[in-house]
Amino acid sequence: QVQLVESGGGLVQPGGSLTLSCETSGFTLDYYAIAWFRQAPGKEREAVSCLHNSDDSTYYLDSVRGRFTISRDKVKNTVYLQMNNLRPEDTGVYFCARGGGSYRWYSPREYDYWGQGTQVTVSS
């Protein structure tokens, strides 16, 4: 069955770095897009970044562009989110999700399977 499992979250000081992993199984990663979303308490889930595995195109939320990098390891079927220069406003639960590669990469409705999430807390 389709599964996405996130890991790598934690507590980090402002300016620090974390790398999140999304290990996928049960489907061929090359045919899908994988996106990272985050949700802070009391806020809606927002798209942070997306990788279209069909053509390696990438997309980023404006506030994370230049600080976050999405990538994948084809052998491990894993998608990563390298997060640098973290800010308190990056705090939230981070989810990875599988989608069909729509241009509406930012819409949660375009994704059919989700991981359980991993907590990222940026605080001094």
Image (cartoon, rainbow, N blue to C red):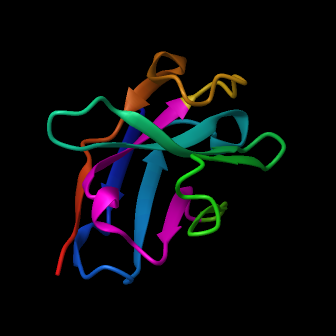
| Frontmost residue, 7 versus 36 | 36
Vertically, is 119 above or below 66? above
Check if residue 107 falls in the magenta segment: no
| Residue 121 visible somewhere in the drawing | yes
Residue 1: in sight, yes or no?
no
Closer-to-camera residue (22/93) = 93
Q: Which part of the image, by quadrant, shows the C terminus?
A: bottom left
Q: Position of residue 55 (x, y in %)?
A: 84, 43
In this rendering, the count of numbered labels is: 0
Point out the stretch of residues depicted in magenta: 76-98
The spot of residue 117 in percent (x, y) is 26, 47
Residue at the image point whose x is 60% and y is 49% from the top: 62
Check the picture and name the quadrant holding the N terminus. top left
Give the vertical position of 66 relative to 22 (above or below). below
**Vertical placement of residue 122 versus 72, above or below:** below
Residue 82 percent location from the top left of the image:
51, 70
Q: Nearer the viewer, residue 17 or 73?
A: 17
17 with respect to 57 (left or right): left
Q: Residue at x 62, y 59 (%)?
A: 65
Determine the residue positioned at 69% across, 28% down.
101
